[in-house]
Amino acid sequence: MRLLAFLAAAGAVLSTVNGQTIADLIKANPNMTEIAKLIPANPAWSQPGPNKTLFAPTDAAVRAAYPGGIATAPAPQLINPTTYKRYDVVSDTAGTISAVYDNYQEPPAVEVHLRTGTNEAIGRAGDVTSNAGGVLVGLDGILNPNLSPVATANTTTQTTISLWAMTVQQAGIATYVNSLKESTFYVPTNAAITEVASTLATLSQNQIAAILLYHIIPQRVNSVDLPSDNNVTTVLGAPYSIRLRYGGEGTSTINDATLGIPGDIETTGGPIQIINKVLLPNGGVPPTAIQLPAGVFAAASTTAAASSSATSAASRTAAATTGAASATTASAASSTSPAAAKPGAASRVIAGSSLLGLIAAAALAL
């Protein structure tokens, strides 16, 4: 569902309005007449506070997305009241939307941002009001539901990480990657993948899969919650861990890669965090015998075998292309959303004799 109303707690307080409930705030805001029509169907909005916040689209946002008004829009989803930090992640009860709550400015110049993996909505002073019942934040847009990690990286809003989506599909592990939940995906930029394309092109499908999975940890770690210095085991299992080090904005690192800004790109599996290098297990030596998690491939060996021949590796990669095509089509079909997929997303597996050819062709198309 695209129409989102968050019922939660927040710290920003501005423009006190008479009344005891969120419903009173809605009725007092001339920019929220569409949402006001939903008050009878949402009794929680009329219950006394304190410590509640409703994030809801303004009339302009509703009518831009749904010309017929609120009557033609999906019903909003609520989350239980909870306390948020200035920067946090919030989710709706339906499990379709997670968004980064980012309070950019404190009163009197309030500017609250809610950012999903594919779009953002902002609440500004004038549409942020409070009373004894809590806070109402009128948003200038309607948030999109979460997409899978691969589909999120392949949308027009994520222009710097599309090669990661292609490489995951080419390796035949898109279905597995998209099945992960409450994980963190450290995704290299297009430039980072292009830089190591010649190395990747000499590896087998299983070796490439192992490298890609080395970038995923089976726990959610938001960018501001990085440990000061800690090794975390990846989905490959022990002893394949990556080193997380918090250093503040623009200086936090994952192994020797720097964490990009903005972070916390929400997906159905957890946040994507953009990094500026491809991480390699074994201190940079291509993996030779890493046991892959069960179910990574629909029908393939689960051991990342060593490859000493670039020609042999290329033929295996070409064979993987055929098997990955159906997974790519399924992924593209499941990614339908207001955040448009890039042209040709449904057929992004490029025919060729090597991964190097795939990356080169894709890079030229960007």
Image: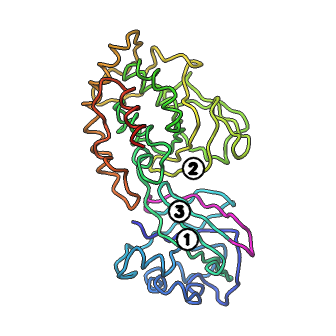
| Image x and y of residue 117, in percent | 49, 54
The answer to which quarter of the image holds residue 239 is top right
List the residue tagged with mark 2.
Answer: 264
List the residue tagged with mark 3.
Answer: 120
Amino acid type shown at disc 2 = Asp
In the image, the segment drawn in magenta is 94-110
Q: Secondary structure at mark 3?
A: strand
Proximity of marks 2 and 1: CB atoms separated by less than 8 Å: no
In the picture, measured across the screen, residue 366 lies left or right of residue 32, that is left
Instruction: Name the residue at the front extreme.
Output: 364
Front residue of this view, candidates 193 and 85: 193
In the picture, measured across the screen, residue 164 lies left or right of residue 13, that is left
Q: Secondary structure at mark 1?
A: strand
At horizontal 40% and vertical 73% (from top left) the residue drawn is: 65
How crowded pointer 3 is (Cα within 10 Å; few <14, some 14-19, many 20+) is rated as some
Front residue of this view, candidates 177 and 247: 247
How crowded pointer 2 is (Cα within 10 Å; few <14, some 14-19, many 20+) is rated as many
Amino acid type shown at disc 3 = Glu
The mark closer to the camera, 2 or 3, is 3
Quarter in which the C terminus is drawn: top left
User: Separation of disc 2 and disc 1 at Cα?
Assistant: 21 Å
Residue 306 appears in the rendering? yes
List the residue tagged with mark 1.
Answer: 7
The answer to which quarter of the image holds residue 220 is top right
The mark closer to the camera, 2 or 1, is 2
At horizontal 57% and vertical 74% (from top left) the residue drawn is: 54
